[in-house]
Image (cartoon, rainbow, N blue to C red):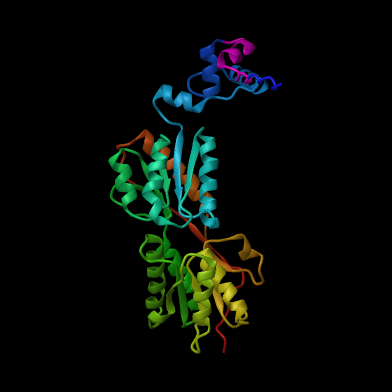
Amino acid sequence: MSAPRRQPIARPTIREVAQAAGVSRSTASRALSGSGYAAPEVRERVRAVAKEIGYVVDVTARSLKQRTSRSVGLLVSDLRNVFYAGLASGIGEEARVHGRTVVLVDLHGDGNDELAAAETLVGSRVSGVIATPVSRHLSEYLSRIGVPLIEIDRRFDADSTDAVVVDNRAAARDTTMRLLKAGHQRIALLIDETEWTTGEERQRGYLDALVARGVPIDDSLIVQAGWDADEATAAARAILSRPDRPTAVFAANNVLAEGTWRAAAELGLRVPADVSIAGFDDAPWMSMVDPGVSTRMQDSRALGATALRALLERIEAPDAPVRTIVMPTAFVDRGSIGAPPA
């Protein structure tokens, strides 16, 4: 004998919330959505009743009814990198404050999937997109179909797309200058790429500092070191194994800094007695090693929260002038920079 079919449990309705709270359906709707006026004591009573009986606002149904979406799209390069994870966290926290949901797509380091990922977000009816772009094609595609975009961390379309970034050039110049002031002349730059604005501007800042101090530029000390810690370790190991090895390394992101630290340890080089290390971005491990890694910190969560607010402002004012928001950075000295070896 087959078991009797279980009847689906009916979800509480807005009408039931209104009846239990002793208000009209429209008042209950206003109290729960925050759209329109409801007296504070009424709002609290309605929300308490909704929580008690288990009523949850159907965001999708509301969006269809109002012909607007309460979701925003987020397209990030690689969540395995703590920097991008911080961006996503900041965006998610700010979205909740504004009653928005986030539809996330992670490229896992494969930029070839960018447009397909964007199509997935558009298919999810997002009201706008925040992205760490890998090409100009993303802004062109979204602009063509009328979906607002905020470029974050790097930018490709300064003329027609809003962005939230840091001043990578000035930050890299200041970081390199700290190594120069410590007495280093042979400073290697480990960089992941120079096709995006982040890498290109960080390399320019490094070169700016060398020129300002009259230090000859040695192109052999500028090394593109790949996208993961293993590739970064191999590149750092190669340059630190040279007979004329650099006395300092500026690793232009947290993954490159990890690779440099690993390579120095494998080669038995003491930090900073044998080689000084300066990073860009912060990561938990940097404060857990001895000495800690001195690095240029950018607040990825604040970047994400700012980008979410910028997107909502763009959705509300689609014809407003395009703008670039530049966020601050700070240098954290943890002791990995010292005088060059005698």
Placement of the C terminus among the 4 image quadrants: bottom right
- Residue at x 51%, y 50% (from the top left corner): 87
Say which of 111 and 215 sits in front.
111
Residue 316 location (% of width, % of height): 37, 33
Residue 182 visible in the snapshot? no
- Please name the residue shown 42% across and 41% down the image: 121
Position of residue 49 in the picture relative to residue 211 (left or right)? right
Tell whether position 16 is magenta. Answer: yes
Image location (x, y in percent) of residue 158: 31, 52
- Residue 251 screen position, x and y as percent: 50, 70
Q: Quadrant of the N terminus?
A: top right
Q: In this rendering, is residue 2 above or below 298? A: above
Observer able to see residue 342: yes
Residue lying at 52% horizontally and 47% vertically, measured from the top left: 88
Pick whichever, 216 or 84, lies toward us: 84
In the rendered image, residue 122 lying in the magenta stretch gets the answer no
Q: Residue at x 41, y 59 (%)?
A: 167
Give the x, y percent position of residue 166: 43, 57
Q: Kindly give the residue lying farthest to the front in the view shown.
A: 1
Tell me the magenta residue range. Answer: 8-23
Camera-side residue of 225 and 298: 225
